[in-house]
Image: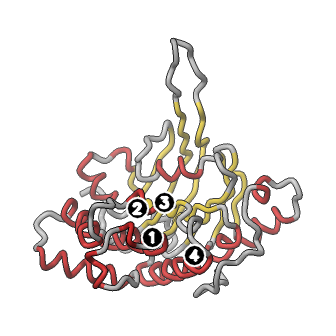
Amino acid sequence: MVVDQNNQQNATQPLLAVRNVTLHYAPRRFFGAARPTISAVQDVSLELFAGKTLALVGPSGSGKSSLARCIPLLEQPSAGQILYRGVNLSTLDRKTLKTVRREIHLIFQDSASALNPRLTLEEILAEPLVIHEAGRTAGTIRKRICEAMEQVELPEKWKSRRPLELSGGQRQRVAIARSLLLRARVLILDEVLSALDLSAQGQIANLLLALQTHHQLAFLFITHDLSMASLLADEVAVMRAGRIVQRGSPAEVFTVNLQSTSSPLLRNSPSRETVPATLISADK
């Protein structure tokens, strides 16, 4: 096993590191005409630490979601490295990469599209255990499902419900529960709060903070909401035109952008005055 899953992560070392990652798309050719290559991500580097949140903010089309898909190698970077626990993921064989991906989970804004509407919650939550942990008994799987549902505050009696019977916030809880079932260490949260009403945003944010503290999870929190980013993040990175153009604490980054009337970050983001709800910890 290349990656030692059992070693304690040194708090001074990143759990996951993105090193000089570039992603180019080659558009399809129509009628033989060559089309220019699109650079979605350009020479991006960042680090995620256990128990910490890095907020990635920036205007639409800046490359945030493309970078998110590169991290678990759902998109193969054109250049650069993705290091998890110090190991370059691109050097791993398929079997080992599959094992590592259990610890790196992407959760999207549209939870409904990520959950099979024909399955019950119990079937949806059992699926990753069946795929990744062959040999588990039915009783063990049921116990793990009940534990995960309890952690995300979903009633056990809802196991027979289907995704379309749930609210957006409840579906996000199911998506988070799937990550917990495989003991994910890194959650890539791609606009997971933006489709929810203000009350649900606060509830899910509180849940994420509590789970992060309990499990020492690392979050890459991709958002347009500067208010939520300032409340949740330990560090903020601003992305524009595929590049990281600014990094620092929330106070440093947002103070600079508030002082600039031409800031594209502010033009493409909700008002910082719209704070969704009181959170467990607002002093990160």
Q: Is residue 58 visible?
A: yes
The relative height of residue 283 versus residue 10 in the rendered view (above or below) is: below
Q: Are marks 2 and 3 in contact (CB under 8 Å)?
A: no
Front disc: 4 or 2? 4
Q: Secondary structure at mark 2?
A: strand
Given the image, on which type of amino acid does mark 4 rest?
Gln
Q: Residue at x 87, y 59 (%)?
A: 260
Residue 197: x, y in percent?
59, 73
Q: Residue at x 53, y 47 (%)?
A: 66
Q: Are marks 1 and 2 in contact (CB under 8 Å)?
A: no
Query: How far is the residue under mark 1 from the one under mark 3?
Result: 9 Å
Identity of the residue furthest to the front in this view: 165
Residue 253: x, y in percent?
75, 65
**Front in this rendered view, residue 209 or 213:** 209
Query: Image check: 175 left or right of 169?
Result: left
Quarter of the image for residue 274 reads bottom right
Identify the mark nearer the N-term, 1 or 2: 2
Q: Secondary structure at mark 1?
A: helix
Q: Where is mark 2, residue-wise?
A: 105
Identify the mark nearer the N-term, 2 or 3: 2
Front disc: 1 or 2? 1
The relative height of residue 105 versus residue 139 in the rendered view (above or below) is: above
**Front in this rendered view, residue 56 or 61:** 61
Given the image, on which type of amino acid does mark 2 rest?
His
Q: Where is mark 1, residue-wise?
A: 172
Query: Image check: 233 left or right of 157?
Result: right
Q: Are marks 1 and 3 in contact (CB under 8 Å)?
A: no
Bin the neighbour count of mark 3 within 10 Å (Cα to Cα): few under 14, some 14-19, many 20 and up.
some
Query: How far is the residue under mark 4 from the one under mark 2?
Result: 20 Å
The relative height of residue 145 versus residue 54 in the rendered view (above or below) is: below
Query: How far is the residue under mark 1 from the one under mark 2?
Result: 13 Å
Q: Where is mark 4, residue-wise?
A: 201
